[in-house]
Every structure is written in C-alpha cells, then in structure tokens.
Image (cartoon, grey):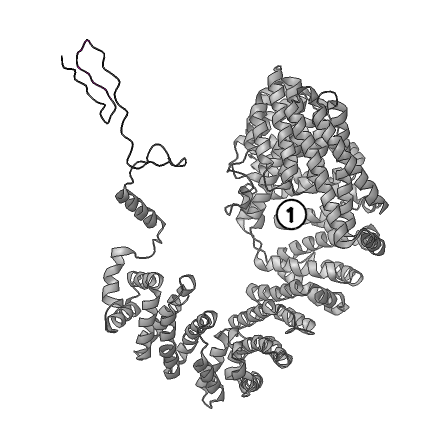
Amino acid sequence: MKLKFTFPSKNRHRTSTSASVTSPPPPPPPPPLESSLRNPFEPDINPPPRNYLEEIVNKRRRIEENQDESLLHGFELQQHVATILQSNDLSSLQEVIDEYANSKDESLFTIFKSFAHHYPNAFALKLAKLLEFQPPIQTRIETVNHLLQVLPEGINGPFNSIILLELKNPLLHSLKAESEEILFLSLCEAIGLLADRFYRCSLGGWVELLEYVLACFSSEVQSENKKGLLLLTVIPVDVANERAFWLNQGNFDLVFGSILEWTYRDKELKGLAYNASISLMLLSQELKRTDVCDFLLPNLLSIIDEHGEEEVLVDRVKRLGDLVTLDDDGKIFAGVHREVFWCMIRAVEIEAASEEVMCEAIVVIKEFDTVDVETMESVIGNLSLEEVKRVFAVAMKMLSCVIDDPLWYDVDDKNCTEAGFSDAFHRGQFLFNFLSLDGDEYVFVPTAIGMITTKYASNVDWRLRHAAMLAIASIAEKNLNEMDMMLYFNEVAILVLKSLDEPNHRVLWATMHAVKCLSECKELLMRSQYHKKFLEKLVPVIRCNSCARVQVEAIDTLKSFAVSMQEIFRQNHYDTTMEALKAILSNKYSLPKLLLCAKCQECMVYLVRKVGPDDFKEQEAVQVVESLISLDGKLSNTEYLTKCIILKALDQICQCPKVSVDKFIDKIMPMLIACAQPLLDLTGEETNDDSLSNEDKRLVETMRARACNTLSHCAVRSSINFSPHIAKVTPMFIRLLGCSSSEIRKASILGLPKLLLSAILGDKSNDTKRDTTFIIVQALTQVLKTETDRDLSTLVLRLLGRCIETSSTFFTDQLIKIVTDEINDTIRRIIKFEIEKAQESGRRIIIEKAQEVGTSEDVFRSLSVQETIEEVVNLTATAIHTFEDQLMVPVNDLMSNVSVFLVWSFHLNVF
C-alpha cells in the first residue's frame, strides 16, 4: 500500500488522504534565508498605504483656505505674470500702469498687489527699470507708488541680494534726473527703504548715495537742496558706519552747517530742515558729535513755537516725540527738559488747537516722564504759582474734550464706560495727575480749588463743569488727607453739594465721583453736618433720576457713606434707601436696566448684612436668590460686570448665618458652576485670549474667583445637599489650580478643603470619602511643587494641616507618604533658598543693610520664608501627632529630616 503525505503549505494548513494508518509528523520547515531579530519598536500591523493624491488635494485645500482673498493666486495670476513680468520689454507694464492711472480700476490694483506679494523681486526691478526711462509724469507717480508698496514686502520675504544691487542705480539715477517736486518725497522714501535693506543685509553700504546727499547740500540749486534734506531724513542711521566718509573729509560739518543756516534763515527749506535735523541728531550720537544737539534742538523748539498750519504742527510734534523715544541714554535732551515741557504746553494753549495737536504734545511730556522720571518730577515740583495756573488750565481744557455720546447712557453695553471720552481727555487725565502727584501740593491744591471755584464749577459749558467735578474727585483722592482738607473742605463741599442739583446727567455722574471721595473724610463731614446734606440728596437721585448710569454711580456713592458711618446711616437713612432701591426694582412703568437691577439687589443685600440686622426672613432670602437667578438668565455670556455683581450679592446671602442655604442650593448650582468653569481650555490661556480686552480679562478672573468662593461657602453650609455636586466641582477646582490668575488659584486652594469637609459630613459612603480625600490632598501637595507665589504656598501648607485634622481617618498609607514626602521636599527647598541667599550676600551684610535702610526687599523675603517655616512646623507636628502610630516609616524619615532642619535653623539664627 502506498502512503501519500502532503507537506504543509505556506499558509500552514495541513491536508491528508483517507488512510487508516496514522501519518508520521511532518518534517520541520526549512530555515529562513536570512534570520534577524524583530525590531521591538516596529508595529506588528503595517499602517495602511498612504493616499498621496488625497494628501496633495487636502494640502492644496488648506493652502487655499488660508490665502488672502484680496489677492490673486495660482493660475489666475499666471496669465498676468506671463504678459507683464516675464516679457522682455517694459511696454506692457507701462500700458497697465497708464490704464490704472486713468481708470483707477480695482482689478488692476489687485494685480499690482498680488505681484508685490508673490513676486516682489521681479516686480520691483521692472518698476525701477521703467522709472529710469523717465516716462510721463503720471506714469512716474504711479510707478513710485507701486515701488513704495513692493519694497516693504521684502521685509517679510527678503529680497534677493542680486536684485537689491540691481535696484541701486536705476532708483538713484531716477532721483537725480527728476525735476518735478511732487515726486521728490516719494522717490526719496523708496530710496530710503532700499538703503535700510542694504545696511541691514550688510551688502557693503551705498557710498554713491551718500556722495549724492553731500552734492545736494553743496549745490546752489534749491531743488537739489530739497532732495538732500529729504534723503537725510529717510536714510537709516546705519549710515554712521561710513565713519570715515562723514568725519575725515569734513562732510558731516558741511551738512550740519547747511541745516543750521536753513533752519535760521530760509523759509522755503525750514520745514525740510526741521525733519533732517532730527535725523542728523541721531546720526551725531553714533558719530560721537554730541555738540550738534546743543545747537539744533533750540532751533527745533523755535520752529514748533511758530505753530503754523495744524497738519504741519502735528507732524513736527510727532517727530519730536519719536526723537524722545529714540534717545535711550538721554544725551540728546540733557538739560532741556523744562524747555521742551513748556514748548509742548504752549502748543496746547493755542486757542484753536485741535485735539490731535493736544494729544501729541502731551505724549511728548509722557515720554519724557517715562524715560527720565526724576528730572520731570523736578520740572513739575519747581513750577511757580503762575506756571501752575497755566498747566492746570491746559489740563482742564483737555479734560473738557468729551462728547455726549448716546452709548454712554446704556449701562448694559460694556462699551459705555469709554463712550464719549476722547484721547485728548485721557491725555488730560495724565497731565492733571502728573501735576497733582508731583507738584508742590501747597501751591497746587489752593490754586486748583480757587480756579475750579471761579472759572469752571459754574461755567455755562457742561463739559467744563464735568471736568471740574472730576478734578475735585482727583484732588480729594490723591492730594488731601484730613489735616490738609481742613483749609478747603467747606469750599469744596459747597461746590459738590450744589452740583448734586445739576440737571445735566454727565455732570451729575462726575459729581458722584467727587462725593464718593469726600465721604472718606468722616470727621470733616460730621463737623459741619455735610454727611446729612449729601445723603438727603443722594437718596432722591437713586430713586427718581431717569439716567441709569447716574443711578448706578449714586448707589456706589451711597454705599461708601454706609461703610464710613454705619451707625448714622442705620439710624437715619437705612429705611429710605431700602425703599428707594425696592422702588426701582418694582417700577411697573419703566423696566430698569439689567446692570441697575443687579446693583440694586447687591446694595440691598450689602446693607442688610453690613449695616442692618444681618438677617433675612426665610422667604425673603429665597425670593432674592430667585430674582438673581432670573436676572442672570437674561444676560449674555460676555456680560461679565453684571455677573460679578450678581455673584457678589449671592455670596453675601450664602454667608448670612441665619439663611438656610438648603432652601435654594439646587437652584443656584447651575449658575455657579457655569460661572466658575472655564469657557475655554483654561490652563492660563483664556486670560491671554486676544478677543478679550484687559478689563474683560480682569472681570473674568473676578467672576471665576467669586463663583469658586460661593461654591465653597455652599459646600460647608449645605454639606448634605451639596455632596451630589462634589464629583463635578472638585475636578473643576483642581483644574483651576493651573490658572494664570493668582486670584482664581487662591479661591480654588481655599475651596478644596471645604469640599473635602463637605464630603466627610454629607456623603454616606466611606469609599467616596476616602477617594475624595486622596484626590484633594494629592492636588494640594502638587500645588507646592509648581506654585510660584510664596504666600499661596504657605496657605497650602496651612490647609493641608486642616485636611489632616478633618479627614485623617480616610488617609491611606500612600497618601500619608505623599504628604510626608512633600514636607521633606519643602524643607529642602527652604534650606536651599536660605543657603543660596546667605552665600550670595552674607547674613551679616543683610542685617547691616536692614539696619541702615530700615526695611529692605531681603527682609521682606525673610519674613515670607519665616511664615512658611512656621507652617511647615505646624504641618509636621500635625502629621506626627496624627499618623505616628499608623505608619512609622514615613514619620521616621520625616523626623530625621526635621532634625536636620532644626539644627540648620539654630545655626543660621546664631550666625
């Protein structure tokens, strides 16, 4: 009988014939041709094959989505490139430019913009070549304009160095040949852009250009003089690298002498010489010719004092401000700060001075104050009585630059705060504060109050009355303590009291600021019974005024009185104020603004808590909370200010000892969680969101912090009803620990132990308590590793001790080790910090310095470290006392580290 065997195939499936005899085992497979170890990092399953065609399509789609829609791209542009840029002659380019000059066709302008963006090298060279052939004037104008568009493109996409070299001669030749003055400035600007690129790219400079500048200054032809002045104005200061050219042959003195003469005598060239003088002064600093500024700067100030046309004056003052900014070492303006200050004041004093002139002049003063604070303080501090009057009048003139913008009245629009306030107004605020803070208060205060009384407070122009009240508020806030105020208080109080009858809403709003500042002078108010007079007028303003913006400010002002004189307010004005606030909320004929509603409710809650009986009737509290929730539901996500006010009121209610939070906790939780949790992925990024203004960022931080604080209070005061929310609130608090705002981090740090206490008291599951304890304590220990604010780190150490005291039963061995390890790490960090500090300056030197100057930054740092040490000691004692019998190993490790710590502390104190 023949037996048939079938050997295993490649797929290892074995087949056999029907046979009664058992087949022997198959032989082993042959060894592979090449044996090698498998790469452990190579995946067992090969990735799917790439679809390159699809990838190309997707890439192209992404490119197209990011393309500038105002430009032409791809095939759409190529047809124009072929006919205009790639042609061998210039006729096609000239034809298109002429067509655009005559028709101003936007499609042609789009082609030029696209050339400048995609083909700056070829387009610039074509334009320069065309210009060199001196086409008709209109063509030259358009050609230079396009050059000014394309040359800056090279900043983002650098020009080819060969193209830069090719552009030199055509542009310089064009300027030399140009006879039309209308083109001088634009041609020089184009050459200036090219020169700037030359010197920044280290292409060997442009000596031919400098020689032509010198030739222009030496020429007897005025048009050539103008070209030279314009070129000196626009060429970069890097031309100072050609030091030998300027100094060895007397070329710098030639230019300097010509400019000096033209600024004195030549009316035609004076304006251009002014601009060139600024460039020459910057050049002189690089060439160490500082004497030049002593001659040129007085000339510049004299030219500004001529004032002349507004547009010219604005440009000259702007250029002077730029020079102040560029004077890094202060050598250009050394010794002339007072002269420049008064030159700017004279520019603002012009009767018909525009807001732009005033703004630019004060910007120069502000730049001076930024660059050299001490010198400017001396200038202001040494003003005479007459000079103070002049500067004060200028500040008031600028403070009156406001308009009655309808948006100002809409308190629910977040843009209302700046509505109607011009840039000149804000510059006026700077000048006023500058004068009030750095001026001699014994001269400034009586002068300012006297001028406000006689000239501004009763002026027929509401804008000046508005400025007067803001000025009084600023004076009261910044300059006068109660002793200084005694001489002028009656005079000021009478003015402000009279202004409370003001019919103009803008002026009345400003008056509220003044009243609020005067409310700080409690003794002076009570001495003449002014507090009663103010309060008698404030309450009707809150109740009856038709302007919500005024009512909101009046509520804040009244609260300031309630704070400073609680007993008097409680006895005489508490009931009438509460009635006025309720009347606003219950007005059936006029629906109040949302911000005003929030302000009224927050003020009512505040007065009950801080001034009144500190008690709400049970149903009253629920009604207020429901009203706040309803109000929040009407707000958009970006109305941060109103949300902050609502949260402030809600927080006060939740802290009231006689209010049962259980009655409404389920109603307020959605709102609190929505306000506390980040709208974006927040690890600090949201506060850097460009879509938020600085004020909105501040309000968002305040909103989050207040929501976290309120959640924390609810967790403690309603632990049973709050416990279902702990699983959602705890991760949110932990996430906020990574926020860039210290205010939010502090609220989260303070809140986590309260959440833990709530879980211990309110949850019935020991497993849940144990898990919550682990999560919260571990999160707090992680804060110690990353927190840069020493005060917050100290706070965490204190709160960890409380967590041990309240929930030690639920500490696992692992968690105990985490805490003790972190104590050890903290001790090591403290020791390292103190040793490094001692090595850096020496303990004795620090003590001697502290004794010499009273208090130093090092002392403050040492105090901060001392507080941290105390909290480490307290936490260590708590941990040892609580866990000594439970787990000896970590405690023994901790004790050994503590002993080292105590020895080190002893030696350092002895030292």
**Residue at 63% from the left image edge and 37% from the top image edge:** 745
Q: 13 or 642: nearer the eye? A: 13
Viewer-proximal residue, 642 or 7? Answer: 7
Q: Is residue 275 left or right of residue 400?
A: left
Question: What residue is rendered at 64% in x and 60% in y?
Answer: 428
Image quarter of residue 763: top right
* 820, above or below 271, in the image: above
As displayed, is residue 366 above or below residue 191?
above
Query: Magenta segment, which residues?
Result: 13-20
Residue at the extreme top: 20
Residue 599 is at least partly visible in this image: no
Q: Which residue is under mark 1?
A: 509
475 with respect to 762 (left or right): right
Residue for point 79% across, 46% down: 521
> Can you give x and y, in whole percent of width and height, for residue 565 in the image?
79, 38
**Within the image, what quadrant is residue 27 found in?**
top left
